[in-house]
Image (cartoon, helix red, strand yellow):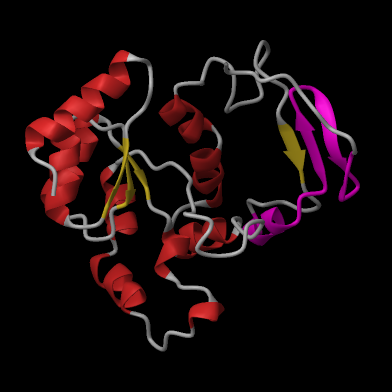
Amino acid sequence: MARDDEIQAIVSTAHLVGLKAAVHAYSAVAIKDAVRAGVDSIEHGFLLDDEGITLMKKAGTFLVPTLSASYPPPIFRIPDPPSVKLRNEYRAFERAYAAGVKIAFGTDAGTFTHGTNAKEFDLMVGFGMPPMDAIRSATVMTAELFGISADAGALEPGKLADVLAVRGNPLENIAVLHQIDFVMKSGRVAKQDGRMTEPFTYPVAFP
């Protein structure tokens, strides 16, 4: 485990050059050390304790709960996986959300098939987060975490025209977000009627 001064040096250097510092942390001790060092977000945080929740809320540290990572994909063929037991025992996501910790959307994709990331919405809502807050975690809150709220994260004049549309109301059934029918990126249509528009390129918005 890195020493406190090493963590602080990494975080301060990242912030010095305008970068965010994200920490993949599981244990309560590691989470609290990272938050005290000024990290911007904790990824996973499955063993988050009450003191850690208090520290995160006070510091404005985001939790990226990656609930999907708690459930190993079928290829692992792990009966009754310990990750599920730990997640259900500590309920870090539910407790952090109830306490007012900022929640940003993230999945740890790569441990499961890319393109199935929307199952994170199902889990968030299934564990008690209202559908609108789950959607906000992937838009408004993630833009805030990334430091790009002035340009993205909401449909407002002057921001990038990043839009997606689905057939159905995700506030009534969050699962409709699994099938995206329309995508506009920076004002250009990238997907329409469920089909990608080819070729599709767009200028980098954040050099």
Residue in the picture at 57% in, 16% down: 207
Residue in the picture at 13% in, 43% down: 2
As rendered, which of 189 and 157 lies closer to the eye? 189
As rendered, which of 44 and 104 lies closer to the eye? 44
Name the spot of residue 131 as percent of width and height, x first.
55, 51
Residue in the picture at 21% in, 55% down: 48
Q: How many marks?
A: 0
Residue 75, placed above or below residue 65 = below
Residue 137, placed above or below residue 189 = below
Name the spot of residue 61 as percent of width and height, x first.
28, 35
Name the spot of residue 107 as percent of width and height, x first.
49, 54
Residue 52, placed above or below residue 144 = below
Question: Along the horizontal axis of the image, is 8 left or right of 151?
Answer: left
Question: Along the horizontal axis of the image, is 102 left or right of 38?
Answer: right
Question: Along the horizontal axis of the image, is 162 left or right of 16?
Answer: right
Furthest-bottom residue in view? 79
As rendered, which of 139 and 21 lies closer to the eye? 21
Range of the magenta residues? 172-197
Name the spot of residue 59 as percent of width and height, x first.
21, 30
Furthest-top residue in view? 158
Q: What is the quadrant of residue 75 in the picture? A: bottom right
Residue 115, placed above or below residue 32 = below
Question: Magenta stretch containing residue 178, yes or no?
Answer: yes
